[in-house]
Amino acid sequence: MKIAEIRLLLLKLRLAKGIGIKGEHNVYNWIISNQNTTNIDNLNSKIISQIAQLNCKNAKIFMDDFDSYSIQEKCINNLKHSKYICIVDDNYPNSLKEGYLPPNILFYRGDISLVNASFLLGVVGSREHTNYAIQALQNILPNCVKSNAVIVSGLAKGVDKLSHQCTIASGGSTIAVIGTSLDKYYPADNKELQEYIAKHYLIVTEYPLGTPTAKFHFPERNRIIAAFVRGVLVVEAKEHSGSLITANLALQNNREVFAIPGRINDIMSKGCNDLILAGAKPVLSSKDIIEEFQY
């Protein structure tokens, strides 16, 4: 199989209904294992649904959509109006490829070379942050940026947004991994910041243009952040929060996990304190992060 043919097939899978990220990954693994013995033209929708291990309901949805004229229109639209990197491309990050369910396709706007920076630091935390989170970020991120850290976060309300803003204000570079397509803004008041990051830094997403926003996209997005980076800093987190999911995914990917300690009776620090009890490294200054990544 030629790389161009694989790229187009994987893009088409990303645009199709009924398959999902696990099914897409099954197909990718099958292609890599059989690329020297199989003609990609022989992979019709029925065969692909079997390779993807889809149930009967999803297989029908997938086959109907994959064989439709609308999927061709979606391909043309995304090829015309957005850029993407594919898991078979040379510039696809090895760190991401080694993570849990790496996305076959990443759509982007901005400087894609940032994905291969040597020091990528994820920052996550509560959407309903306190002043303590602001103080912690202002104390820690500037020196990380001076040590060439590229800050990766999810452009959500709260700590995500603050981490992007603090990085930019400190003269650093940032990557926003969003849970929507590139033509949507969530939350809406992040539109200006999202456009600024897309112009000067990098926005990435696995969701093609026009994808409706869905709640489950954001936990899916977290696995990308956790795989991208060399370490994840949790700034503020309630017990059982989404930030802890990202931290646990990072641990599964053998990444460093850092946490800002807080008062023992503060619910906004409960998640961070629990992470520290479980073995995450407490961060009192930027040095506690930087020393882990010195060569």
Image: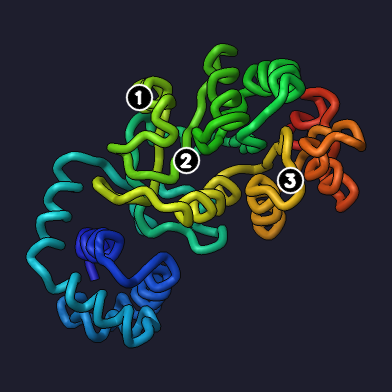
Q: Amino acid at mark 3?
A: Glu
Residue beneath disc 3: 256
52 left or right of 10?
Answer: right
Question: Which label's residue is closer to the chain start, 2 or 1?
Answer: 2
Q: Amino acid at mark 2?
A: Val
Q: Quadrant of the N terminus?
A: bottom left
> Disc 1 versus disc 3: distance between alpha carbons?
30 Å
**Element on which disc 2 rests:** strand
Which residue is drawn at the image coordinates 44% and 45% (left, top)?
179
Q: Amino acid at mark 1?
A: Glu
Looking at the image, which is closer to me, 63 or 200? 63
Q: Quadrant of the C terminus?
A: top right
Is residue 100 placed above or below 288 in the rendered structure?
below
Residue beneath disc 2: 177
Which residue is drawn at the image coordinates 28% and 80% (left, top)?
48
Question: Which label's residue is closer to the chain start, 1 or 3?
Answer: 1
Structural crowding at the residue carrying mark 2, measured as other residues with C-alpha within 10 Å and reported as few (<14), some (14–19) or many (≥20): many
Looking at the image, which is closer to me, 240 or 120? 240
Residue beneath disc 1: 195
167 left or right of 206?
Answer: right
> Disc 2 versus disc 1: distance between alpha carbons?
13 Å
Question: Which label's residue is closer to the chain start, 3 or 2?
Answer: 2
Q: Are marks 3 and 2 in contact (CB under 8 Å)?
A: no
User: What percent of the width, then of the height, locates residue 127?
Assistant: 61, 34
227 left or right of 71?
Answer: right
